[in-house]
Image (tube, grey):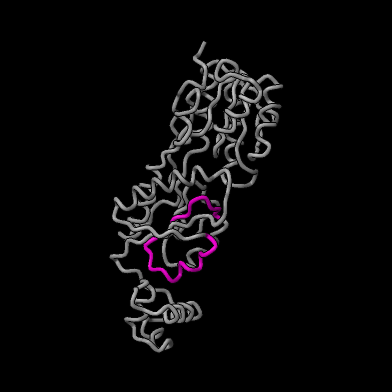
Amino acid sequence: MKIQDLAKLAGVSPATVSRAFNRHPNIREDVRQRILELAQQHGYRPRTSAKTRRVAVILPDHEIYPIRNCLEMVMTAIAHELPRRGFSIEVLPLGNLDRLGSMPCSGAIAVGAEPDDFAGWAERFPCPLVLVDRAPGRPGRMVHSVRSDENQGMALAIGHLKARGCRAVGCIVHGAAGHGNVDARCAAIRRALVAHGLPADDACIRVSQDEGYVNVIGGMLRQGVDALFCPGGNAGIIAAFALAQFNRRVPEDVSLLASENLQFSRLATPPQSTIAQDHLGLANLVADILDAYRDGLLPEAERVLPYKLIPRASVRPSG
């Protein structure tokens, strides 16, 4: 269907149709809604101008833990890098995804959402989608992934604790099994523990949400762990609270390594050793993929960046 056909159905001019899709202020809301509804009924999709640099950032429409802290850091990076590359950003809740069909966009970015939420993407929307901090699963056409290397990051953390003399590491992955990166992290941690000759049974690797976190740490302390590795969410804050409740000093009694939280890790007492994702690097990869489409190129389906280690005082010195 052409824009002229939709205009005829709606009883307006093609210019009015164009204004409806571009949210022009001089068009009545009832007219705009009628045009959008007719477009959806008849499968009309606005052509994206070569000059369009608008990107829809799709966010969860309800509170999701433990990804909130990660989501905030990713969004900060996206808001910094994409405008610098000439893109404008419009935030769209996941529950309003159908609205994307009426927005002229050069691409969409999904943060903190699961790949299954976007099944059949290319058949529904005429722009590429980039999943941030998620493996692509079974990617369809025009669906891409930029993420951190969970295998490398978990191995980096366990290797650091082993090098500092830790011999019994308790690992609590913040989240719920089957969601986000939890299963990938658990598997990567187990491989790293085995590779370094450290205990790697189920008692050493647990998954927990906020409510049970303190009790899980208490159980690990009773087993005699000398270090805790707590990736995901705000786990560093909760782990520090739990250790204080059990009268354990960091790092004299227990070394602690968590995921970087910009608002907390370096200001904790003592400052927390962390593994950190390259959020600015991820945002740049997103922009690279969107630019590739504009240049008529087909970018890779998946791009992966390494974690980095930030050693601080919460892990005891070797020896």
- How far across and down, in percent of the image, does residue 3 sit? 37, 81
Q: Is residue 232 above or below residue 157?
A: below
- How far across and down, in percent of the image, does residue 104 sit? 38, 68
Question: Which quadrant of the figure has residue 214?
Answer: top right
- Foreground pick, 301 / 128: 128
- Foreground pick, 274 / 188: 274
Q: Is residue 227 above or below residue 308?
A: above
Question: Which quadrant of the figure has residue 206?
Answer: top right
Q: Is residue 294 left or right of residue 61?
A: left
- How far across and down, in percent of the image, does residue 146 sit? 44, 47
- Foreground pick, 50 / 255: 255
Image quarter hosting the N terminus:
bottom left
Magenta-drawn segment:
94-115
Q: What residue is at 47 percent from the left and 65 percent from the top?
A: 122
Q: Is residue 239 left or right of residue 317?
A: right
The stretch drawn in magenta includes residue 201 = no
Q: Is residue 21 left or right of residue 41?
A: left
Q: Is residue 48 above or below residue 173?
A: below
Q: What residue is at 48 percent from the left and 29 percent from the top?
A: 274
